[in-house]
Every structure is written in C-alpha cells, then in structure tokens.
Amino acid sequence: MFPPYVWKTWVEFAEILNGLGETLSMAFLGTVLCAIAAFPLSFLGAKNINRLNWFRLGTRRFYDVIRAFETLILALIFIRAFGLGPLAGILAIAVGEVGTLSKLFSEALENTSNKPVEGTIASGASRAQSIRFGVMPQVTPVFPSIILYNFESNVRSGTILGIVGAGGIGFLLSDRIAAYRWDEAWSIIFLIILMVYVIDRLSALVRTRIIVKWEGAR
C-alpha cells in the first residue's frame, strides 16, 4: 500500500470522483426515500399519538422486522431483482433504514411535552390540530437532526454496498483489491475516510444551525 498511488491524469481521477459522487447520491436518495416512508409510520408507533395498543405494538414489531434485515443482505436481494448498479443500493438503504428512522421519530414524538397539546385542545382544537400545533413544533428541529445523522451512516453503508455490486466507490475499491493494486486501494480508502469526515463536520454544523435558529425563533 505504500507509497499511496497518485493519479496522474484527470481521466483516471475523474473515475474515482464519479464513484464518490455515486456513493453520495445513493446515500442521499436512500435517506430521502427512507424519511418519506418513516414519517407517517412514526406516528402510528408513538403512544401519545396512536392510542390503539394492538395497532401501535404491531407497528413497533414491524419496525423490528425491518431492522432485522441487514442492509447488505437487502442489497444482494435488490441486485438479484434489478441487476448491478446504484439502484439496488438506493433501495437497500431506503428499505433497510425505515425501521431505524421510524423508531427514532416515534421516540422523539413520545418525548414531547403534553402541555402544548392540552392548551390547543382547551382552546377548541381538534385531535389533528392539537398534533399539528402542539406536537409538531416540538419535534421540528429534532427530525432534521435525526435525518442528517442517518445520512452520515448511510454514506458509510453505501461504501460497503458498492463492494457487493451496488455501484459507487465501493465497487472501484473492490476492483482494485481484486487486481492486487494495493497502492491505489489505499488511496481510495483515504478518500473515503476524508469524504466521511467532511460530511460529518458539515452535518454537525447544519444540525447546530437548525437547533440554534429554532431556539431563537421560539
């Protein structure tokens, strides 16, 4: 692996950048689809929203069933269904993280204060309006923070999914290892570490700005 490989032409390096961009795209689209599905499911699993115990517990068990499937296994299933490429990775991330995101969203809903809800009901609000104006303002800064953290995790997952054929930088890394081009493999690993670090820092900054802005607005 030493010394690390240095790409000498733009054509060579462009392939690596394209792989990094594909991994980021997989993680982003997978996270967006996952969040869209998890948002309504989280209300069904929160005890302060869904008062039907059997329905709420059934929804919670549904979370557990989805979380039991490793993202890597889902990627292999989707590769079999749709072929090699980033589509399989996007679907694997979207389906595999629905259970986790739904659980985190529902716990955030359950940890809200009941006083704003009681205030809206006392003023004549319906059940839906009490959730809209009593619960949602409390979780508005929390949900984006959870989504951003999940996106960070999915970037790392997207790298691994590429190794099994779901595209992205992981596919290029697997190709270099199979060809015993260890110096280039190490350079790719270094770029992956750098990418994850940059995303982690940017995500932390965005989360902080969201929370500070929301607290200031309140």
Image (cartoon, helix red, strand yellow):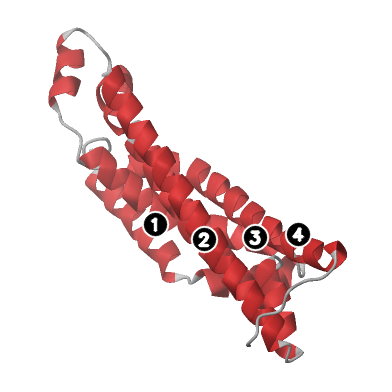
Expressed as whole percent of the image width and height from the top left, the position of residue 185 reads: 67, 81
Answer above or below: position of 178 versus 61.
Answer: below
Q: Name the mark nearer the viewer: 3 or 2.
A: 2
Q: CA distance from mark 3 to mark 2?
A: 11 Å
Mark 1 or mark 2: which comes first in sequence?
1
> Spatial distance from mark 3 to mark 1, Cα to Cα?
21 Å
Which residue corresponds to mark 2?
Answer: 196
Q: Are marks 1 and 2 in contact (CB under 8 Å)?
A: no
- Label 1 is placed on what type of residue? Thr
* CA gap, disc 1 and disc 4: 29 Å
Residue kind at label 3, given as amino acid type: Thr
Report the residue marked by disc 1.
Answer: 100
Image position, residue 208 (x, y; %): 35, 38
Question: Looking at the image, is mark 3 or mark 1 earlier in the sequence?
Answer: 3
Residue 41 visible, this orientation: no
Q: Nearer the viewer, mark 3 or mark 1?
A: 3
Tag 4: residue type?
Asn
Distance from Cα at disc 3 to Cα at disc 4: 9 Å
Locate residue 112, reporting x and y percent.
20, 35
Q: Quadrant of residue 92?
A: bottom right
Position of 97 compared to 47: left or right?
Answer: right
Q: Nearer the viewer, residue 14 or 114?
A: 14
Question: Which labelled disc corresponds to residue 18?
Answer: 4
Judged by depth in the image, the label closer to the viewer, 3 or 4, is 4
Q: Are marks 2 and 4 in contact (CB under 8 Å)?
A: no
Q: Which residue is mark 3?
A: 23
Circle nearer the N terminus (1, 4): 4
Residue 202 can be seen in this image? yes
Secondary structure beneath dot 3 equals: helix
Lateral position of residue 106 relative to residue 102, left or right:
left
Q: Nearer the viewer, mark 1 or mark 2?
A: 2
Q: Nearer the viewer, mark 1 or mark 4?
A: 4
